Image (tube, rainbow, N blue to C red):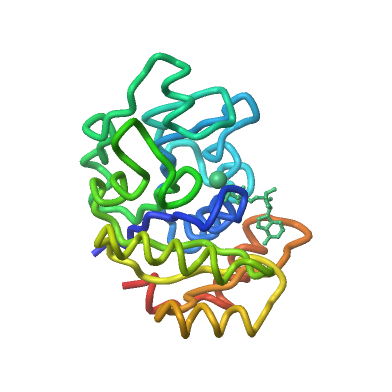
Amino acid sequence: MPSCFFITGTDTNVGKTVVSALLCAALGAIYWKPIQTGTCEGSDRATVMRITGVPKNRTLPEAYRFAPPVSPHLAARLAGVRIELRKIKLPQIVHSENLIVEGAGGALVPMNSTQLMTDLMAHLNLPVLVVARTSLGTINHTLLSLAALRAARLDLRGVVMVGKENRENRAAIEHYGEIEIVGAVPPLVKINRAALLRVFRQTFNRKVFLA
Ligand SMILES: Nc1ncnc2c1ncn2[C@@H]1O[C@H](COP(=O)(O)OP(=O)(O)O)[C@@H](O)[C@H]1O
Ligand SMILES: [Mg+2]
């Protein structure tokens, strides 16, 4: 069975792309960001290729790309488009490959007038990982995200923490969220393939990722 995950987060800018890149490098996985906004500032697909050296043919093209750095529902509306789940399909070829799918923003980010990022996760039917900050405020953001993901009956596999280690926050999330912290990415001076692989070896629970 291939290892496939949907990477969501407690917020935008929380480390989803870095964690996705780390998992692509560690698992030899294909990377896919189905909905990319803010292409005026670059794309997460390009960032993953740059920091991991993953070639373009190990990434999939976005289903939707929008220039403004705003929520997908708004970016689509400004472009006169409606984001449709049926247009976001996993190509057959990846069914035998490890796959990392990165969401946009967090769990309840809207895609259109009736659907949220949780609907995309359910549609793709992938196990979900939540990326969370280690710093103050993370307990509330993480517990809220977990509650939303559970309400949507998603297959929640764990939380990955990003930032300077905070043992109390980590313990609180595990206790109150009844969830495993499956990995932790410390602040990295250089984010490259070697550094990401080292973090995977040192802090990630391999049992969760390597079937
Ligand atoms: N472990 C880390 N060490 C140093 N910088 C990080 C780390 N994780 C993320 N960053 C930086 O934080 C910013 C946001 O990370 P990113 O992965 O793009 O977040 P998201 O995908 O959730 O928006 C980026 O500039 C990224 O390089
Ligand atoms: Mg990102």
Residue 5 in the image: above or below residue 66? below
User: Can you tell which quarter of the image residue 76 is in?
Assistant: top left
91, above or below 74, in the image: below
In this rendering, the count of numbered labels is 0
Task: Point out the residue furthest to the top here.
Answer: 80
Image coords of residue 10 (percent x, y): 52, 58
Residue 48 in which image quadrant: top right
Looking at the image, residue 98 lies above or below residue 73: below
Q: Do we see residue 61 in this rendering?
A: yes
Give the image quarter of residue 152: bottom left
Q: Residue at x 42, y 71 (%)?
A: 158
Q: Is residue 207 left or right of residue 19?
A: left
Residue 11, position as x, y percentages in the image: 55, 52
Picture residue at 57% right of the left edge, 48% below the top: 12
Q: Nearer the viewer, residue 118 or 164?
A: 118
Q: Position of residue 105 (x, y in %)?
A: 50, 46
Q: Say whether residue 58 is visible.
A: no
Q: Nearer the viewer, residue 208 or 29?
A: 208
Q: Residue at x 58, y 72 (%)?
A: 184
Between residue 22 and residue 68, name the one nearer to us: 68
Q: Quadrant of the C terminus?
A: bottom left
Q: In the image, is residue 3 above or below residue 71?
A: below
* Residue 65: percent from left, percent from top: 46, 26
User: Which residue is located at x 55 percent, y 40 percent?
Assistant: 44
On the rendered image, what quadrant is the N terminus found in? Answer: bottom left
